[in-house]
Image (cartoon, rainbow, N blue to C red):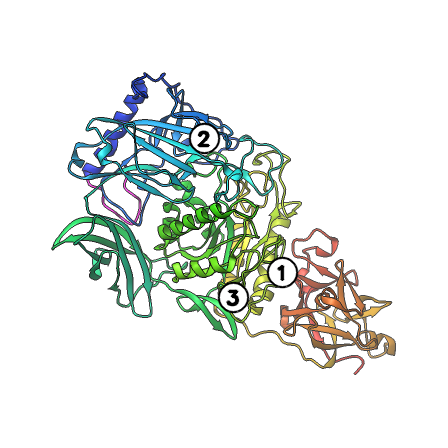
Amino acid sequence: MRRTSAPPFPVPRSGRRAHWVTTLLAVLTLLAGTALGVSGTAAAAPRAWTPKPAPMTTPWTGQVPVDDPLPEYPRPQLTRPDWANLNGIWDFAVTSADAGRPASFGERIRVPFVAESALSGIQRRITQNDKLWYKRAFTVPSGWNGRRVQLNFGASDWRTTVWVNDRQAGAPHSGGYDSFSYDITDLLNGGTNTVVVSVWDPTQTGGQAVGKQRINDVTPHPGGGIFYTAASGIWQTVWLEPTASAHITRLDMVPDLSDNRLRVTVRGAGTDGHRARVTVSTGGTTVGTATGPVGGEFTVPVPDPHRWSPDDPFLYDVRAELLSGGTAVDSVGSYTGMRSIGLARVDGLLRPVLNGEFVFQTGTLDQGYWPDGIYTAPTDAALRYDLQKHKDLGFNMVRKHIKVEPQRWFYWADRLGLLVWQDMPSMDLRTPDAAARTQWEAEYDRVIDQHRSSPSLVMWVNQNEGWGQYDQARIADEVETYDPSRLVNNMSGVNCCGAVDGGNGDVVDHHVYVGPGTTVPSATRAAVLGEFGGLGFEVAGHEWYPGGGFSYEDQPDLAHLNNRFVGLLDGIREVRMPRGLSASVYTEITDVENEANGLLTYDRQVVKVDEARVRAANRALIDASRSPAAPVTLPTGQYESLRVTTAGHTDRYVRHQDGVVFTAVVTGGSDTLLKNDATWRIVPGLADGTCYSFESRNYPGEYLRHREYRVYKEGGSGDLFRADATFCPVRGVNGGVRLSAHNFPEQYLRHYGAELWLATPGGTHPWDNPALFTEDTTWTVEAPWAP
């Protein structure tokens, strides 16, 4: 065993020795082919294990140890020094779904990688008609004598049954995203023991939570869309751990900045007559300590708390002890971050506030898939890498999309400083039946329990785009009651795909591709953009299925990708954030299989975008939310003219001619018609009163209006016309003003070849040319030519 990297939870020498002894004995047993058979029948010796070639190799594919993959302690918020990692090579077999235990295990699999993955050594399609079987031998270190032995699974998808020495360990576990444990003490024999595990995973053919998994070919193929390869069986670390008979099973911690304290609940097993003591410290110095009942909440003082935030992700060390009288019979290490999250009105708009301050949350959609391990990152360094790239790119948030990661992923988010929106993985797209609903809600509660102490996690996202939707309002209320310390999103993408908004929760969440759209807050919910972007670029040599990639908007080259992406972030900062948008989630951090929307390639070998430029754009967005500039306003109810500011063309003004809008030179000697055509009455925006519309001087009731990028003078009615005829002002260069389209905030009114167009930074049309883009989209509002 290797010590967990940080916080510095000490691992006694005996703990390390136990792990290596256990691993060595197990490997020798497997290599000798002496694993116990079934009912006295000798098992056939499994074939030698070799990995399969990954369709794409990540920088960590070749760094995965054969016999000791993912050696880090897997549960950083509830640590004990003695443990034995059971990851590595297990005997393996696949039977029909209704079959009993096989008489022989003819293959080998590297746990905890799923059977569909290359890193498992199996790399085979698994269907609802299959059942997976795992077996390995282990011994319990003699130093554990007198203690209970727990067999822990980080996660296994989906219905998992465990036997130790041919006796079943508790009830089968149903769930693909939550951890589970068995006390196997009474099943042990004192020598070499055998554990057998069966897993049945129907994926989308069942009714359970599956997220993006679909039963497909495991090797690259065309199609697949936004759904990906299934992940069946054990996919997180399996380990043994000794505990006292009375021991701590969970530590719930909720920071309370209003009273400078940490609210804690220590949960345990066999704890009658015991009390709990919790100590908070930093750098070895005790900050506060308190004693309270097991299973009941009590508080630990944390005077003058050092607050956790993405800019300063400070973590306190925590020690929880189980007391019998004055003696500690169990002790676990943990950590916490002191922060608050909630909603508040900021300048009249409802916003999420972190530590009482509005900080715009800019993040990406993170699917958590790997071309070599599928659901399981090849190493802990790989798990950390995706989060670190968020930080490198200037993001302060990540939406973990329809998957729940191992607890070490949350540890890295806590330590690196990223706000986390956690999706509950969805069921299949169809409406679920009663049994599926019961299972999904029970698993959701367990997911909340297991991650409720992570300071980075600030919002639960219940459902997505109507997939398997039901009882949205009830579920949101129940999640808010079950975990009142976080925000709740009843449905991400309420405007999309047949979704039905529950109408409650803390945010109204829209999906707009490419976006950023016009989401606005309500009287009770903040406005967030749960998905936008999807800009695609395929990097030759780094495609999952060459030629099979797709995106929401393909980019011809990296220059366009960078300009377009930064233009979207700038549009949010300049237009949508001042009008109430509080968070945005870009699709997505990496390519995934045939999706080519990533800022990184699927193999994590190439960062497509200019890191420094994206980081600067994200930083500007975050800084603007903390110190907003005064809004740009225009005079209303009076006539004005709009003058070009581009050097060499400053004698030109916006004018209409035959219904189309141009720029033209206007002087005191110009005729009356031209002066009238170059004069506009500024009125409150037809679609948004905080923006503006421009009414023709000589054609009352007709307005500047964009249509298919070109700008016209037209009359009309209806929502589309009103949106097309509304422009929102942002600050331009040299005191000028830029006019952003209300319904396309990243597009600006631009003169190009004397014509007026809606131009897009990074766009591919001639009028999107980056040369003089800012100058050409900046205007001066001047006295009217025709008063």
Q: Amino acid at mark 2?
A: Ala
Instruction: Name the element at disc 2.
Output: loop
Q: Where is residue 704 drawn, in percent x and y? A: 76, 69
Q: Nearer the viewer, mark 1 or mark 2?
A: 2
Query: Circle 1 sits on which residue?
Result: 517
Per the rendered image, the range of residues in magenta is 1-12
- In magenta segment, residue 10: yes
Earlier-in-chain disc, 3 versus 1: 1
- Residue 760 left/right relative to 321: right
Q: Are marks 1 and 2 in contact (CB under 8 Å)?
A: no
Write down the quadrant of residue 51 in the picture: top left
Q: Which mark is residue 528?
A: none
Residue sitting nearer the eye, 19 or 193: 193
Q: Where is residue 1 drawn, in percent x and y? A: 27, 36
Residue sitting nearer the eye, 270 or 507: 270
Badge 1 local density, few (<14 within 10 Å), some, or many (20+)? many
Q: Amino acid at mark 3?
A: Ala
Residue sitting nearer the eye, 720 or 561: 720
Q: Which mark is residue 526?
A: 3
Whether residue 483 can be seen here: no
Q: Residue at x 64, y 50 (%)?
A: 560
Q: Residue at x 56, y 74 (%)?
A: 630
Earlier-in-chain disc, 3 versus 2: 2
Question: For the view shown, which residue lies furthest in the left direction?
Answer: 326
Q: Which mark is residue 115?
A: 2
Q: Are marks 3 and 2 in contact (CB under 8 Å)?
A: no
Q: Amino acid at mark 1?
A: Gly
Find the distance from the CA under tag 3 to the CA under tag 1.
15 Å
Q: Nearer the viewer, mark 3 or mark 1?
A: 3
